[in-house]
């Protein structure tokens, strides 16, 4: 599973004036709900998905596509903007793909 921006306690701490522009960039126009990630997980764990292997399911409201367009345009993506909100360097490493030195 690769969840996108999901409404969690951590996300609720992000000020609305910061979150609104990020949310507007999502192709579905809203953040995801924990229930949506859970339902996708249950679906993958079901017998109906028994032949699905080696797949990363992105439950991200199209966030990946938005980031790819931004990279092509040379502007920061949603991931980078959210990482900018994390003040502590350790937290930045936890929420980034670069975990060297941890």
Image (cartoon, helix red, strand yellow):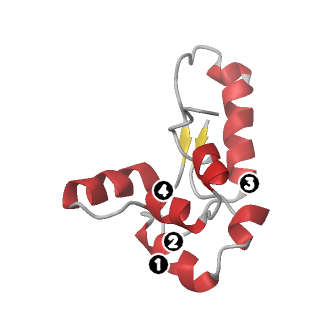
Question: Whole-Å distance between the Cαs marked 3 and 2?
Answer: 16 Å
Question: Whole-Å distance between the Cαs marked 3 and 4?
Answer: 18 Å
12 to the left or right of 81: right
Tag 4 secondary structure: helix
Q: Are marks 3 and 2 in contact (CB under 8 Å)?
A: no
Question: Whole-Å distance between the Cαs marked 2 and 4?
Answer: 12 Å
Question: Whole-Å distance between the Cαs marked 1 and 4?
Answer: 13 Å
**Residue at point 70%, 36% (across, down):** 41
- Indicate which disc, 1 or 3, sits on the residue closer to the N terminus: 1
Residue linked to disc 1: 21
Residue linked to disc 2: 23
* Callout in the foreground (3, 4): 4
Question: Whole-Å distance between the Cαs marked 1 and 2?
Answer: 5 Å
- Indicate which disc, 2 or 4, sits on the residue closer to the N terminus: 2
Residue linked to disc 3: 34
**Residue at point 54%, 45% (across, down):** 96
**Residue at point 59%, 58% (across, down):** 5
Residue lying farthest to the front in this orientation: 101
- Indicate which disc, 1 or 4, sits on the residue closer to the N terminus: 1
Label number found at residue 79? 4
Question: Whole-Å distance between the Cαs marked 1 and 3?
Answer: 21 Å
The quarter of the image holding the C terminus is: top right
Tag 3 secondary structure: helix
């Amino acid at each position: 599973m690769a969840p996108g921006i999901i409404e969690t306690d951590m996300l609720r701490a992000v000020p609305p004036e910061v979150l609104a522009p990020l949310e507007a960039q999502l192709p579905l126009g809203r953040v995801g709900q924990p229930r949506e990630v859970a339902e996708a997980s249950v679906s993958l764990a079901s017998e109906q998905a028994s032949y699905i292997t080696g797949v990363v399911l992105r439950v991200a409201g199209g966030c990946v596509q938005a980031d790819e367009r931004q990279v092509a345009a040379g502007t920061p993506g949603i991931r980078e903007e959210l990482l900018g909100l994390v003040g502590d360097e350790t937290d930045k490493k936890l929420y980034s793909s670069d975990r060297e030195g941890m």
